[in-house]
Image: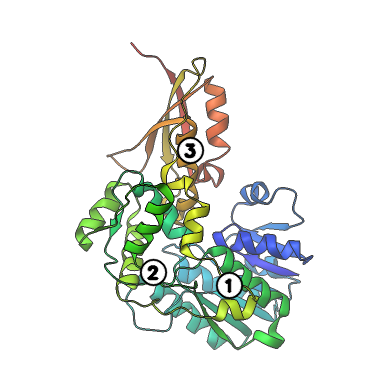
Amino acid sequence: MITVAGGTGLVGKSLTQALVGEGEQVRVLTRDPKAARVAFGDAKVEIVGVDFDDAATLRAAFTGSDKAFMSYGTSDRQVRDEIALIDAAIGADVPYLVNLSVGGAGGAHPANVVQWHTEIDAYLATTGVASTVVRPTTFTDSMLNLAANYVRSGAWGGTAGAGRVALIDSRDVAAVFAVILTEGPQRHAGKIYDISGPVAVTMDEVAGYISAALGTVVEYHARTEAQQRAVLESAGLPGLLVDVLLGVDAITRDNVYAVPSPTAFDLTGHAPGSVKDWVDEHVSLFAAPAAPLRAEEHTIVIAKGSITRPDALAPHLDDEMRVLRELKAEGVVKSAYRRSAGPGFYFILEGPSIDAVRDRVDANLPFVIENLATLEYDEIYEI
């Protein structure tokens, strides 16, 4: 039995699907079993709910496992909760742990994600359990899913400067973990793998790939840290996530991930995808025009969104933005606004009926599926 902690995250979900496809028995640990069942559908996955404030539930969730994948979404609780996962797995006598860390961990770079994983990796090393640590560079999909929001409005930019980064697709990260977990500790215990994509790129070069795919000019606007912080905060991003994103820019600017590693190829036998390939595959994210509504689809709905768990938004933000773009492209979401007086948002929606709109939005927005936000719907009329 392979237990996957963080099985609904970018890497964890792809990893779980890969392991199931290879015939492995997989158990996914989650704080939201209902959302996990939706995510995996009919796949043969055991789903177990856990409470990070209850060590007994964590320990019981690992019982009977012979290997475990350890991951946790970006949060102000990340260090505490990942250490709790490690302790729980060891307490349940799991003999082999494979940990998702981050490139540069163990070093001195001040970015918060690097320092958090430095602490987690150091703790794991003191436990004596057989383990492997994988340290990827920045995920292509995380960076560009977020960037797509700003590309469409001509406002993409940041503080990365002329720095280079060998971005890696999270699917390639998952493929590395699948190899390690299936081959096991006999080959991989005690090792730290630094993995990356095949080519280090600047943000201007990424803008060039997007421009070529769209057939129009896309620019990456250079900003100071204060300017970029203001842009991100004005978009309603939580303060912790703003700090994380500024740290990611600093990692790029400082060329921490500027030298590509062959390790992903060495482990999996295939080259990880390039940034250009990812852009070409997902070009619609950057430019899909809103589809016109048919004349009969003209019920107008206003939805008030209330954030119930602001500390847990970060791991789901990329998916939330992607789905929101898709709903805008379909013409369901006409406009979206952040509340000025506290966390929350408003949507102006259109569809054949308020029920149809509600069903379409509630069934697709990750914040709603994960019980991080609630929406109140009212049909409105022009006067």
User: Label 1, label 3: how many angstroms apart (C-alpha)?
Assistant: 42 Å
Report the mark closest to the observer, 1 or 3.
1
**Label ID, residue 271:** 1
Q: Is residue 190 above or below residue 149?
A: below
* Residue under the point 74% across and 76% down: 66
Report the mark closest to the observer, 2 or 3.
2
Q: Is residue 301 above or below residue 102?
A: above
Do the CB atoms of the residues marked 2 and 3 lie less than 8 Å apart?
no
For label 3, count other residues whose C-alpha is less than 10 Å away and answer few (under 14), some (14-19) or many (20+). some
User: Does 320 sit left or right of 208 as displayed?
Assistant: right
- Circle 3 residue: 374
Under mark 3, the amino acid is: Thr
User: Does 246 sit left or right of 144 as displayed?
Assistant: left
Under mark 1, the amino acid is: Ala
Q: Position of residue 146 (x, y in %)?
A: 41, 53
Secondary structure of the residue carrying tag 2 is loop
User: Residue 133, can we see it?
Assistant: yes
User: Does 251 sit left or right of 170 as displayed?
Assistant: left
Under mark 2, the amino acid is: Val
